[in-house]
Amino acid sequence: MPERSLKWHYRSRHEHLITFSNAKIYQSSLITFPSHVDKMPGYGVEYDLVKDGVYDRSKKRNNVIEAKRVACLVFEHLQKSPGRSLGVITFSGAQQQAVDSEIRKLRLQNPQYEEFFKEDKDEPFFIKNLENVQGDERDTIIFSIGYAKDASGVMYMNFGPLSREGGYRRLNVAITRAKYNVKLVGSIHPTDIELEKTNSEGVKLLRAYIEFAINGPRTLEKELTYDKVVNLESPFEEAVYDFLVSKGFRVATQVGCSGYRIDMAIKHPTLDGRFVIGIECDGATYHSSRTARERDRLRQDVLENMGWKIYRVWSTDWIKDSVTEGEKLVEVINNAISEYNEDTLFESTLANKQFQSDKFEEQYLETEVITTGQLEEGNNNGFDFPAYKEANISEVPRSGYPTRDICNIIEHVVEYEYPIHFELLCKRIAPFYGNKKATVKIRRQVDSGISKMSRSLIQKGDFLYPKNYESVVPRIPGEDDVVRAVEHISPDELISAMLKIISVSYGITKESLFQVTARQYGYNRMGSKIQKKLEEAFGNMLEENKVEETEGRVTLKV
């Protein structure tokens, strides 16, 4: 089949976000659009160096110090740019878990920000690793490298998925997820990656990207032309440029990094790095467009959508009456300067807001170790799941007939904890026989009792229900920290929990659904057993037509 590559790039609201990939991956074939700001915090690509970061090579295979810094940056984002969506990408699953743990600690200390972490948004907050972030995009991306020198000061050239074949593609996907800003967080300098010690294209690309994040586009030998030289393409543009300079305006020419550039842009007279308006002339760029729609409407629509104000000067009008056209141009520029407002760059709640970057780092000095129970108790996420409590068999009156008593106890426990696994039921009944553990004899007695209760009990596999039960209520660890093994939680209960989570989390991904569900039940890590149980429950929901999965998002079936 014939192929055709897409050329125009729209996602990046700052051109530097795509400049690196355009040069290194796409051979500068993409048409990208210049930014109405140059170098400003919160725009483009930035490198945040964690000087004391150490990679734990022997045990956890993560960088906790760097994870703490990432958590701090997340909460700095909440103060500085709450209106922007945010995602965190890590190089490895181990670093993903470390970042998630540190963020949860700060969430417990700062509950006023919980609204930001709700999943019922169009672009909810996420933490993903390099291998499962395909297709996501957010306004700001914090990217944690994690890999660094170990405690002995040795730097190995193993960067996990990045070092494998095709790793450079994974890196390219990750660094192009942001619309406004990428904060690359690392504990290494570019020179720590010794190219002679690796043949991995992905690792080599990472070193180049770190250099780009530190030094900008000049590392690609494609500096923005407005930094040093005046570049004009026709005598008409020269005439307009000379006129603007004579009026005292600061003018940049050929603004942009790719094939499409703005002819001239007026810099703000007092604020560095801001362009108040772009001036388009019908010169070479205009005439190189293949269609009138492309040159007259599409380009301008894209630029205005990125925050530019665009004014077009026509050569025929300028030649006929340069005085009148010049007066119009000066008036438009002066209006643009007087109307310029920082709120057009940042959310209105952030204008002139002071911000202490070390606030959240100081909190770590006072942070105590948080147990699993404490973490889950403060992490109910508004689902209103009741706490799981064990039945007390001492509440069941005794009749003096062992067979009748065991049936009464079984009925009481099942009614209190249904759906309950057979093994848990045996454990609850063990004290009736003077035991702490469920022995073979106890299992036989319980099994015998169940066989006599077909009129009052229902058995589905290994789980028992009251005969006339109406619904299954998910129950999670509470004050008593009763964390059940995943094999002791019935598929019906997991389905009930996931349906509730989906109902209040519009457009949640399957992966996030599993993570939230696992955490609700007190599991900090999702091993193969938990994954298998959740997959089983999810498959049942699909078969029963309760949910549907569209473009990676799970929603309730209407």
Image (cartoon, grey):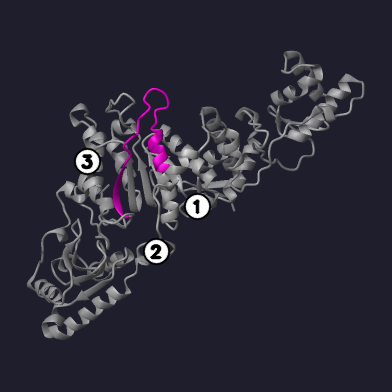
Q: Secondary structure at mark 2?
A: loop
The single residue placed furthest to the right in the displayed view is: 400
Q: Residues under labels 1 and 2: Cα distance?
A: 19 Å
Crowding at label 3, few (<14), some or many (≥20) Cα neighbours within 10 Å? Answer: some
Q: How many marks?
A: 3
Please give the residue where the numbered disc 1 appears in the rendered image: 116
Tag in front: 3 or 2: 2
- Whole-Å distance between the Cαs marked 3 and 1? 34 Å
Q: Which mark is residue 424?
A: none
**Residue marked by disc 2:** 351
SS state under label 3: helix
Q: Tell me the kind of residue under disc 1.
A: Phe
- Residue 227 position by quadrant: bottom left
Q: Which residue is mark 3?
A: 208
Q: Earlier in the sequence, mark 1 or mark 2?
A: 1
Percent x, y of residue 37: 27, 61
Q: Earlier in the sequence, mark 3 or mark 2?
A: 3
Q: Position of residue 111 (x, y in %)?
A: 55, 49
Q: Which contiguous range is marked in magenta? A: 43-71
Earlier sequence position, callout 3 versus callout 1: 1
In this view of the protein, can residue 404 be seen by the observer? yes
Considering the numbered disc 1 on the image, is that residue within a helix, a strand or a loop?
helix
Q: Residues within 10 Å of mark 1 (few under 14, many from 20)?
A: some
How far apart, in angstroms, are the residues tagged by discs 3 and 2?
A: 34 Å
Q: Is residue 506 visible?
A: no
Q: Is residue 327 above or below residue 74?
A: below
